[in-house]
Amino acid sequence: MSKLKVGIIGCGGIANGKHLPSLQKQEGVEIVAFCDLIEERATEAAAKYGAADARVYTDFRKLLKDPAIVAVNVCTPNDGHADITVAALEAGKHVMCEKPMAKTSEGAKRMVDAAKRTGKKLTIGYQNRYRPDSQYLKRLCKRGDLGEIYFAKAHAIRRRAVPTWGVFLDEEKQGGGPLIDIGTHALDLTLWMMDNYQPKMVVGTTYHKLGQRKDAANAWGPWDPAKFTVEDSAFGFIVMQNGATIVLESSWALNTLQTGEAMCTLSGTEGGADMWDGLRINGEDMSKLYTRKIDLGAGGVDFYDGAVENAADLEMRTWIEAVRDDRDLVVLPEQALVVTQILEALYESAKTGQAISF
């Protein structure tokens, strides 16, 4: 069987930290093209992860002209996602685009339309769906163990972990701060668990309270206040068409001790679940309340914990199998579009001080 040839557009942190290591582990896959505006980055990535004859580009349009490339991974800043993905789909490539889907809902809609028009597969890099706890909880939700989920919280809270590299602090490039960066993961996970993609209205607030401080404590060293043009915290209240409520909390810098990201809390008619201390399920049985903590280990014998494929590797394997074997996608572009629409509405609500209806 010939190898599936893949191209990478954007060779920065997310490509080197997630996409390329996971792609390299996939059998029958060959990374044959690398593109970045900074040629040295593309060259370094090609030397580490590429095929012997891998090609390097600084213009993604030239990469897309290669008929041998079947799929591309788009790993650029958010403002490039829509244009590059649409061009790749129209060039006949399948596309995995890093989250969030796009900087704007208009861009995300163009991506969905292009995928439908071309018949090519498009998915978005929401790898937290592939974690063992997420997979288990999704199965419980599908089975109906929680009943009707009518209240949920989407958590993406850091105490002091502002990303100080790349363009994370640049509103023009990214479209926002923690809400669009890590809040998008928490919201995607929550909507997926609820299987509810019909928002009715939102109210959002954003804050620039800590971003202008100099020499601040931070996991990656002090940030430059002059370059901190996005919010440091954002919060949302989301009402769905069926009356369900979601509270979304996101922050890179917040004075709190309860932190955690890409997590959700679910409350249904038959039970509840949260991810604060592992995966916990709660409910009522024979007039008594119970809390059950799920053991997600793969072991069972002494001195062996078992081998569990990490979320990024499972995400990539699932994607490659979808392309090669024409399998169904786990992350549908239509679902990712709703995430982007809600995030955009939250930013608009914060800006205008008004509730935004869909």
Image: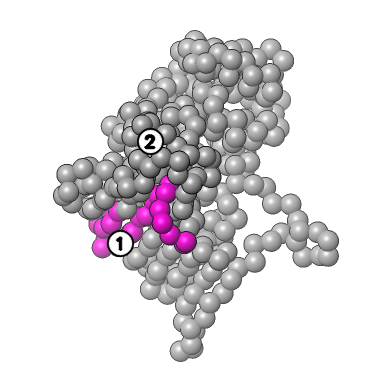
Determine whether, in the image, residue 180 is placed left or right of residue 285.
Answer: left
Which numbered tag is attached to residue 245?
Answer: 1
Stretch in magenta: 236-258
- Magenta-drawn stretch contains 181: no
- Res 78 seen here: yes
**Mark identifier at residue 28:** none
* Labels 1 and 2: the sequence-earlier one: 2
- From the viewer's perspective, is residue 255 above or below residue 94? below
Residues at marks 1 and 2, CA–CA distance in whole angstroms: 35 Å
Identify the residue at the far bottom of this view: 287
Type of amino acid under label 2: Pro
- Indicate which disc residue 225 carries: 2
Return the x and y of residue 111 as percentages of the image width and height: 37, 30
Instruction: Give the percent coordinates (x, y) of residue 169.
Output: 40, 34
Nearest the viewer among 277 and 69 is 277
SS at mark 2 in the image: helix
